[in-house]
Image (cartoon, rainbow, N blue to C red):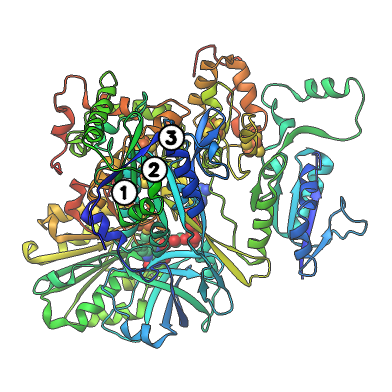
Amino acid sequence: MEFHIERAKVLPKSNLWSFLEGLKKISPLIAPVKRGNKTVFSEVNDISDIIINYTRTILPPKKFLVPYRRVRFTYSTDNLSFSSNFKARDQIIFGIHSCDLHGISILDSVYLKENPDPRYLEVRKKTVLIGISCMPDDYCFCLSTGTAFPDGANWDLFLTDIGADYFVSIGSPKGDELIIELKRLFRDIEREDLELYKRSTRKKKEAFKNKKLPDLERISQLIELEYESPVWDEEAKRCLSCGTCTNVCPTCFCYTSIDVPDFEGKTVKRVEFTTSCQYPYYSLVAGGHYFKPTRTARFRHRYYHKFVGYPYQIEKLGCVGCGRCSAECPAKISMVETLIRLRGTDEKEPGKAAEQTSAGRSL
Amino acid sequence: MKKSLEKLLNKPLPVDPFKPQRAVITDIEELAPDHKKFTFSFLDEGVAKSWDYIPGQFVMLTVPKAGEIPISICSSPTRKGFFELTVRKVGRKTKVLHQLKPGDVVAVRGPYGNGFPVGIMENHNVLIIAGGLGMAPLRSLVWYILDRRNRFKEIYLLYGTRSYEFVLYKEELRRLKEREDIKCLFCLDRVETPEDREWADIEGLLTELIPQVKLKPSETYVAVCGPPVAYKFIGKELLKNGYPESQIFVSLERKMECGIGKCGHCQIGYKFACVDGPIFPLWDTKNLPEML
Amino acid sequence: MVRIGIMGLTGCSGCQCEILNCEDAIGKLIGKVEFAYFPLAQDVNDFSEFDILFVEGSVSTNLDREKLIEGRKRSKLLVAVGTCACYGGVQSQRNDEASLDEMLKAVYGDTKLDLEVFKPMPLSDVVDVDYELPGCPLDKRQFVYTVASLLNGVEPFFPKIPVCHECKLSETDCLLLKGIPCQGPVSFSGCGAPCTASGVGCQGCRGNCDFPNFDEILSIYQDIGLSFDDSVKFLKVFRGKTISGLKVGSSNEKGA
Ligand SMILES: Cc1cc2nc3c(=O)[nH]c(=O)nc-3n(C[C@H](O)[C@H](O)[C@H](O)COP(=O)(O)OP(=O)(O)OC[C@H]3O[C@@H](n4cnc5c(N)ncnc54)[C@H](O)[C@@H]3O)c2cc1C
Ligand code: SF4
Ligand code: SF4
Ligand code: SF4
Ligand code: SF4
Ligand code: SF4
Ligand code: FES
């Protein structure tokens, strides 16, 4: 038997559709498809529906890992035995951009680091993630968040557009198996492919040149020091508390759980549904006390959680710069603008707020 | 792929942390209007045997048909074979719980949260300050300390309620007051009835009792639990009396859905009250905005 | 057996029809509950006492009022169903702008009515209401969930989350961003956002979500080309008295 290690392969663009057809034969295939003027991830029956060059889907692929509404358990009221008929299925998600792959890595940490959720793990084990390279639009800021490239994220295969071909990086044994299965469609990399691959990195970086990007250096500390900044009030005034920004975010995980009994009172379903910290009830406790009573408090909390909370909780920023929250906000509030305003244009560390805070935690 | 991420995925499926264990209500005691103490024991013997906890920890209690609620354990882990919860009737789920009878079965998961740092409290004085229902988790601490009395130095218990009617664990606390190894000071917001008079050391707030405590602050750990509005004032008074803020521990309440860092509701600043709390050193107010 | 009553005051009976459309649920309920009073659906009715009384429609006449007060006395729980019962309904959208005389004149001309008529009110203006299930019409799933919960002695749970929640999670392309007026961000969800999914802006038929930001939504409407007055009228269609204070002509300035 011959052993050899391959880190990457080349998929000629002319073979892309055969590759997708091949994938679909292996497992249910999920990929970006058109919906109106937008793109959404959806299970595909006909691979010709798949959109290869898209900028951003309305919802991230997260919905195929953690459904927005899920039955955690069913229990009988007679003997309180809890059961679940949950079963993960094999699935391949194709066409995920780098930011969303990083988003999934963040979810991996959220769900699996402490008190791991067996359900998430089961889904993740059965899901193959295939990424694809992309070019930014005006909402993207993945270059600032360090998520413009798939390094350090949890994926199986990643396709980088190098002109006539895709440079296919292999990220896991699962990815390797797929390549072996569909071997006839790939060729070995050559020196020239590698050069093109390296150039594609530069090309993406250059595409950000004329875009507004927030400086996220020491962002955790900045947000802590600027906690009382009037910028929060000014931006929050326009916020509708509609929750869109968190509902479309690839890294948000908040949910509420309710028990729903049937008519007979024999069985009860424990249902979890996605929620948002932007909704007032989110922080409401007995006695009618709101821990986040004002729009400003709720608005600020999202930024605080993304840039201070996640770094503490999972040791990574909670934002992957996908731009969805800004692109979908009905009030057109832009995360990038808020962050830039918060830092101030003169790049000086904020003075006023710093004096008020007795101690700052540096990251 | 990063090693840390790879490791997350290459694990066998863990036991479902959301799945609760069945427990039967063995006793219910009406403590005050709308306040009941429930005694439970686990149906599964293995679970009952291995069940252990730290004062200040809480459980997620499934009220059948209504849903899960976080409730502090008010019994002490030094007493085995059962555990107790004191619950005030405030809303949807607690209303249903209050209708249950001994013999009814509920489901419980936990214990969750960090609990009071009982290990580092050893060989120190402990000042326990309870307001209203805050007595519940602190009752666990009181009995934990009394059952291991020789490991701790002087112990004070300050307890404030609206009126005598709302005092929890009345008989138990009366007996405590007679003991030599714990000093109890009780206050009531308003002293009106003869019962109030008999009970209260002073008419007034907990903050007025703090100066009466004769302990060396630097050698004292403080444990506080009370209604959210009280913390600011109690904290201030304690600092004024010289207690170091890293030795004052407060138990905080937030909305909780999961108890294990998955639902997000309980966040206080960058921490989860359910896993990083619910016990926080007062020092954390510097870092965690909106903590108090 | 649990005795249920379903009665209508001034309304279109649409909500009662919607209840009738819950065939699966009603099939399951028969034998467990007794529909003691449901004149829209059955000939034999008994208005003596109830465990749960569902009331549709707004209170607009003395007859409505008497019937409602009587119903409240006879029922352990009273649930307002539909936007008319919860907020006053579309018929109350001009309550704060027109006098009763003007209203009567516009509808009935000079015809004399032998009823005492007043401005349409929600049930809660007259009696204590235990639960409100808004919607024009009410949402079937919510009705079923409410009945199931109440039969089990549990209060139903309805956080007042905005319609955008359900709209976005069903991956509908935002209408507001396309310049189509939509009330999703200020309206109480639970309907599943069927309107936006079919390209029609949410009309706010379920009333306010928690702490709606009317200032901002008015400003957005004006940005996409509605006049201030039209924006206010649009917002007021279903909200009854829950939006009183916002008046046509109260401002010419954007977002005031
Ligand atoms: C760590 C921890 C420990 C705890 N320990 C204890 C304990 O030992 N004993 C104890 O009794 N409790 C304890 N609690 C609190 C307890 O968990 C809550 O009281 C309980 O979850 C309430 O559940 P419920 O369903 O009865 O109330 P819910 O029905 O959920 O409602 C809670 C309250 O919210 C308010 N509310 C709901 N909806 C609205 C609305 N639309 N507008 C205005 N107000 C509204 C109401 O005032 C209602 O009473 C603890 C909480 C935590 C986090
Ligand atoms: S999407 Fe925009 S308007 Fe909606 S909650 Fe987020 S910031 Fe506010
Ligand atoms: S916060 Fe916004 S830009 Fe960042 S990951 Fe979430 S949706 Fe994308
Ligand atoms: S707290 Fe808000 S920003 Fe953070 S994960 Fe939850 S919904 Fe998202
Ligand atoms: S279409 Fe309406 S309901 Fe949907 S997200 Fe946009 S504003 Fe919200
Ligand atoms: S989307 Fe709006 S108008 Fe349509 S049913 Fe829901 S609340 Fe009513
Ligand atoms: S209770 Fe769910 S995260 Fe803390």
Residue at mark 2: C-beta within 8 A of ligand 3: yes
Say which residue label 1 marks: A106
Marked residue nearer the N-terminal end (1 or 2) = 1
Query: At 24% across and 43% down in the image, what residue appears?
Result: A151
The answer as to whether the residues below labels 3 and 1 share one chain is yes
Say which residue label 2 marks: A250
Q: Nearer the viewer, mark 3 or mark 1?
A: 3
Which chain contains the residue that carries disc 1? A
Residue at mark 1: C-beta within 8 A of ligand 3: no
Query: At 21% across and 39% down in the image, what residue appears?
Result: A220
Q: Position of residue B104 (x, y in %)?
A: 53, 80
Q: Quadrant of ligand 2?
A: top left
- Point out the residue furthest to the front here: A1
Q: Which corner quadrant of the image does residue C197 belong to?
A: top right
Query: At 48% across and 67% down in the image, what residue appears?
Result: B34
Q: Position of residue A102 (x, y in %)?
A: 31, 44
Q: Amino acid at mark 1?
A: Ile
Name the foreground residue: B170 vs B258: B258
Marked residue nearer the N-terminal end (3 or 1) = 3
Q: Amino acid at mark 3?
A: Ser
Marked residue nearer the N-terminal end (3 or 2) = 3
Check the image and report above or below for B31 versus A43.
below
Q: CA distance from mark 1 to mark 2?
A: 9 Å
**Contact between labelled residues 1 and 3, with CB atoms less than 8 Å apart:** no
Q: Which mark is residue C10?
A: none
Looking at the image, residue B70 sits to the left or right of residue C89; the answer is: left
**Contact between labelled residues 2 and 1, with CB atoms less than 8 Å apart:** yes
Number of marks drawn: 3
Classed neighbour count for the residue bearing mark 1: other residues with Cα under 10 Å, few (<14), some (14–19), many (≥20): many
